[in-house]
Amino acid sequence: MKGDTLRNKYHIDTKTLISAAVIIVFLIVLVAVAVNISDGEISLSDDTDDIDFDALHKLNPDIIAWIRIDGLPIDYPVLMSGDDKEEDYYLNHKVDGSEGLPACIYVQKDNSKDFTDPVTVIYGHNMLDKSMFASLHNYEAGRGVSEAGNIIVYLPGEKLTYKVVSVKIFDDSLLLDRYDHFAEAADMEWFISDMTNIYDERDWVIDKSDRLLKNDGHYIVLSTCTERAPEERLLVVAVRND
């Protein structure tokens, strides 16, 4: 009986030590990457350009980038679900893997992780508390455009800068499928035409100059829901400053 008690005590102490070690390692990682974590969401402690992706990957290896928009409260990691997860896993999962809103800013697997595709689509929820991509609605019909600056996408070892060229109300179709994954030059021409023509009172074309809108350019499209209809999407289209 005494031996059993000692064994039970040993097992309890071992579990306690393992739990404490896990917590200590996690805290060390948080300090190394200078992040705050609350309710399953990660934010950086400052606005440094020196983002430690090695440390972020220890928290979640599905983090592929970090996005910021000058003039808007958008400052988030960008994720792509791994091979062991479904395509839109981060539509309803937080960065720590827990289920629920506000979920994550994410890119589907059809896009490349390094943002080298002609068009990379980035998805985020339109949250009532104005988090995630909700503040993109400041751009509707030109509201807030004059104050907003560039969109910055940070990758491991690289910083990409994009200029917003248009804001569109669109349907909920998958853009890469709609434009045949931009396999032909005509697909990009169709895309640029759709994204720079005004069809809705909330559309706003900021810059149609040939200097920016090139068929061989690299674009990002930020996509979020609207409040008018479930099949509607607000798209913010930006081209990379190469």
Image: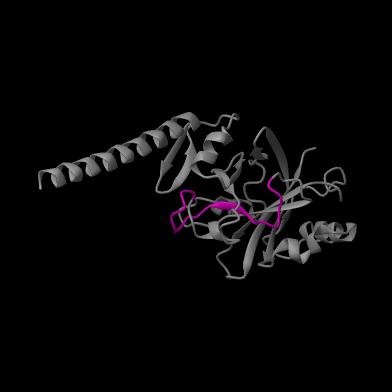
Q: Nearer the viewer, residue 24 or 101?
A: 24
Q: Quadrant of the C terminus?
A: top right
User: In the image, 138: left or right of 167?
Assistant: left
Q: Is residue 102 magenta?
A: yes
User: In the image, 34: left or right of 139?
Assistant: left
Q: Quadrant of residue 73?
A: top right
At x 54% / y 56%, what residue is drawn? 90
* Colour scheme of the picture: one colour
Query: Main SS of the magenta segment?
Result: loop
Q: How many callouts does the rendering have?
A: 0
Q: Is residue 126 magenta?
A: no
Q: Position of residue 111 (x, y in %)?
A: 71, 54
At x 46% / y 46%, what residue is drawn? 41
User: In the image, 17: left or right of 49?
Assistant: left
At x 69% / y 34%, what residue is drawn? 158
User: In the image, 151: left or right of 211?
Assistant: left
Q: Position of residue 37 (x, y in %)?
A: 42, 41
Which portion, as a residue range, is magenta?
Answer: 95-113
Q: Quadrant of residue 30?
A: top left
Q: Position of residue 112 (x, y in %)?
A: 71, 50
Q: Position of residue 196 (x, y in %)?
A: 79, 56
Q: Nearer the viewer, residue 15 or 8?
A: 8
Q: Nearer the viewer, residue 214 or 38?
A: 38
